[in-house]
Image (cartoon, helix red, strand yellow):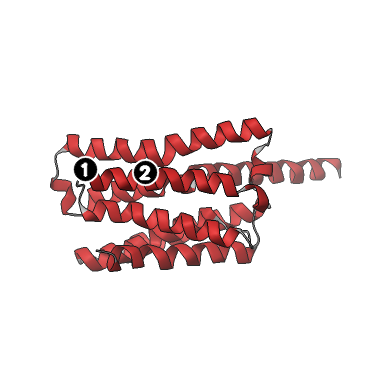
Amino acid sequence: MKGKKKKIITRQKALIMGAQMLSAVFNPLYLPIVGLMALFAFSYLTLLPLLYKLQVLILVYWFTVLMPMAIIRLYRHYQGWNLIELGHREKRAVPYVISIACYFLCTYLMEQLHIPHFMRSILVSALAIQIACALINSWWKISTHTAAIGGVAGALFAFGEIFMFNPVGWLSLTILVAGALGTSRMILRQHSLSQVLGGFAVGVVIAPCCILLLP
């Protein structure tokens, strides 16, 4: 009986560890960099010089991943919060503001450097998703993880329309990842099913609207 109980506990620990790893790998802040890498790999932008693409990726990575993560970590340590406490709805406002400010600055710099519209549209989409999640979070906690992966799905649809390719295969993979990611957030008790689905809906609606409708 003790051996069976021990196996159950071991499986539960492995499940939680797997959920934590999945949440870390698909951090919402990675959305713009993943979108740009996909754009460079599957569109005519592959023809751009490698050095130029690397410079754009470094710029975006600095302002959308390194900078917000560093500032949010400093803020969390200053407040004495752990990661679980930072996930509480009432404590997420400042991290949202930090991320939005970094994304806005990156978008502004890209515009000043005359970086092509298709690249900037990914940043604009990610920024719009962040703002929507921040506004919704003021009264209802929503999953930014599934909002980000929903944004990837929406962007795939939009770029499929623009570049005339069939995105069904990549969309299927993205939806599978979204399901696993949403499940991991519920396993970690960070979100309910409605919050996970709500986040995905926000991303999948906002991303294609920004890419297809904005000039």
Nearest to the observer: residue 6 or residue 121: 121
Contact between labelled residues 2 and 1, with CB atoms less than 8 Å apart:
no
x, y percent for residue 73: 56, 34
Q: Which amino acid type corresponds to the residue marked 2 in the rendered image?
A: Leu
Specify whether 139 is left or right of 178.
right
- What is the C-alpha distance between the residues marked 1 and 2? 12 Å
Specify whether 69 is left or right of 10.
left
Q: Locate residue 192: give its quadrant.
A: bottom right
The N terminus sits in image quarter: top right
Q: Locate residue 162: give its quadrant.
A: bottom left
| Residue found at x 28% / y 67% | 212
Residue 26 shows in this picture: no
Residue 155 shows in this picture: yes
**Secondary element type, mark 2:** helix
Q: Earlier in the sequence, mark 1 or mark 2?
A: 2
Tag 1 residue: 113
x, y percent for residue 193: 63, 64
x, y percent for residue 65: 43, 39
| Residue found at x 41% / y 49% | 31
Q: Count the marks.
A: 2
Res 143 label: none
Tag 2 residue: 105
The C terminus sits in image quarter: bottom left
| Residue found at x 36% / y 38% | 61
x, y percent for residue 13: 69, 41
Specify whether 141 is left or right of 30.
right
- Label 2 crowding class (10 Å Cα cut-off): few <14, some 14-19, many 20+? some
- Label 1 crowding class (10 Å Cα cut-off): few <14, some 14-19, many 20+? few
The residue furthest right is: 1
Q: Which amino acid type corresponds to the residue marked 1 in the rendered image?
A: Leu
Nearest to the observer: residue 61 or residue 10: 61
**Secondary element type, mark 1:** loop
